[in-house]
Image (spheres, rainbow, N blue to C red):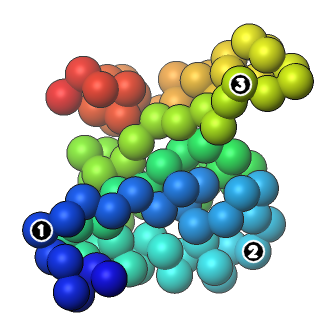
Amino acid sequence: MLKAFPETKIIAAHTGKYHCRDETLIDRFIQTAKTHQNIYLDTSGVIIPKKTKDAINTISSNRIIFGTDGPTVDGARFVLEELNKIRRLKPEDEHEILGGG
């Protein structure tokens, strides 16, 4: 799909897989985003925070999209946890990911 529709923006939800503990799989999605400028990575359900940092270092924060995958049964608490992951990043990356860029 990425090659067939290079002008179409495609979002890889959860940077590949929800609650993924397989760093190799996440790295493959990051590398795919590096190769294809039309893929964006979503932060929801990413439980290895350093992988979001790896994605930023590889493709920059302008192709990382904040997400919460909510609402959930945990409500606002879950959303705040997802938001706090982004707030721990460098201010310029936080600003870009949260839509300020």
Q: Give the crowd class for mark 2: few <14, some 14-19, many >=20 residues within 10 Å.
A: few
* SS assignment at label 3: loop
Q: Residue furthest left?
A: 7
Q: Residue furthest top?
A: 76
Q: CA distance from mark 2 to mark 1?
A: 30 Å
Q: Give the crowd class for mark 1: few <14, some 14-19, many >=20 residues within 10 Å.
A: few
Indicate which disc, 3 or 1, sits on the residue closer to the N terminus. Answer: 1
Residue 90: x and y, percent? 40, 31
Q: CA distance from mark 2 to mark 3?
A: 25 Å
Compared to residue 44, the image places residue 5 above or below, namely below
- On residue 7, which mark appears? 1
Label pair 3/1, CB-CB below 8 angstroms: no
Q: CA distance from mark 3 to mark 1?
A: 31 Å
Q: Give the crowd class for mark 3: few <14, some 14-19, many >=20 residues within 10 Å.
A: few
Residue carrying label 2: 22
Residue carrying label 3: 71
Q: Quadrant of residue 82?
A: top right
Q: Quadrant of residue 58?
A: bottom left
Query: Residue at 79% across / 66% down in the picture?
Result: 21
Compared to residue 45, the image places residue 8 above or below, namely below
Query: Residue at 29% across / 51% down in the picture?
Result: 63
* SS assignment at label 1: loop
